[in-house]
Amino acid sequence: MHARPRTLRRAGRAVRALVLAMTVAGSASTAPSSIAAPSGAPSDATAPSASGGAAASTAARAQPVVIAHRGASGYLPEHTLVAKSYAHALGADYLEQDVVLTKDEVPVVFHDLELEAVTDVEQVYPDRRRADGHWYVIDFSYAELQRLSVHERVQPGTGAPACAGRFHERGLPLRIPSLADELAQVRGLNAAAGRDAGVYVEVKSPAWHRAQGKDPSAIVLRTLAEFGYRDRTDRAYVQCFDFDELVQMRTELKTELKLVQLIGENAWAESSTDYERLRTREGLREVARHADGIGPWILHVVTWPNGGGAPAFTDLVRDAHAAGLVVHPYTLRVDQLPPNAPDVDAVHRALFDRAGVDGLFTDFPDRTLRALGR
């Protein structure tokens, strides 16, 4: 386990005060219907290509972007408004929002379809679980979810911390935010800080949502549009593991936002998408017809051998760039490094200096910014 950065130790009391002040104050649950677009073009803007995707600009690769994975989730519970505030304060270029739908079709910022790993749902609603033993976001209204307290992720079954050295205070009024809550907060933080952090939204499990009678992509894109995120010049990405869903967003829902194809392992069963094929040159060219980038697992880019030695690189970044796609791998965790990686600095060097990725999802945005000399 790596020691916490000195900056966090010094800021401990301030962070706790921030948690209490922001969560007690509550949050706005409804987005205004007409809001001006965020100002300023992104430094990683992409230009449409003839095939309908986008060709990454030289400027994008010269300045990789730092994407706060679920906020500053290495320091505060994931996807809480305070975790996003801290990530913004640390200087992250983008703040990530995973989005699932409630029973009353409110898009909420939450990673899992189920509630129990990061909330106290078992205590608050003991009789609301399904036959499979899980409590699902989609079975609760937004108002009902506001009764839950969010905490650091725990391991299923045991309740043990998923990451032992992280923020494990309980009893703080941390709630599940709506997507509108979070977009309003980002707008306010940008105005107060005088800088334009972007948003990076994932539509979670769209096929599963449709089987439950909901259409998440249309709702997410509509909410983003209400906050002024509408085209490639805006500080927004939309990502999804489902290839067919990204095609639908571009062709049927007609979004002009930058789209990113997330790439996992077929064994993960994230969707019916064949990720092994997408990692081929032909597959990447197909992705580029509709999307602007890919979000692969770090191990799709670089691995380290048992017993030490030089890292081994795949051709994925080179082939993606040749297809006109930016590459934003996931997820850098100081306390859960890739297997056999010697240290966090080695991972940063491999990804930025050797592989040439265009950005990185990180639980520790300060560490990644420091690695980039920012």
Image (tube, helix red, strand yellow):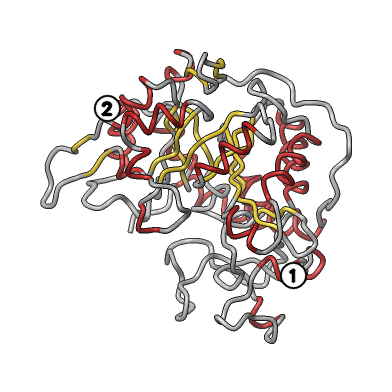
Q: Residue at x 34, y 40 (%)?
A: 277
Horizontal side of residue 342 vs 180, given as left or right: left
Residue 310 point in image, percent of width and height = 14, 37
| Residue 43 drawn at (x, y percent) | 56, 19
Residue at the right extreme?
33
Name the residue rendered at 72%, 66% in the picture: 173
Within 10 Å of disc 2 (Cα), the crowding (few <14, some 14-19, many 20+) is few
Q: Residue 176 appears in which quarter of the rendering?
A: bottom right
- Residue nearest the observer in this picture, 349 or 103: 103
Q: Residue at x 65, y 57 (%)?
A: 210
Which of the 4 image quarters holds residue 135? bottom right
Q: Earlier in the sequence, mark 2 or mark 1?
A: 1
Q: Which residue is mark 1?
A: 140
Return the residue found at the far front.
252
Query: Where's residue 228, x and y in %?
Result: 77, 30
* Relative horizontal placement of residue 94, taking residue 304 as reference (left or right): right
- Under circle 2, the secondary element is helix
Which residue is pictured at 36% across the width and 51% down the height?
265
Q: Quadrant of residue 300?
A: top left
Please tell me which residue lies in front, 342 or 148. Answer: 148
Amino acid identity at mark 2: Arg
As helix, strand or loop, the secondary structure at mark 1 comes to loop
The Cα atoms of the two marked residues, 2 and 1, are separated by 46 Å
183 over 256 or under it: above or below: below
| Residue holding disc 2 | 354
Q: Is residue 338 left or right of residue 43?
A: left
- Where is the N terminus found, in terms of image quarters? bottom left
Q: Is residue 137 above or below residue 254?
A: below
- Which amino acid type is shown beneath numbered disc 1? Phe
Nearer to us in this view, 42 or 89: 42
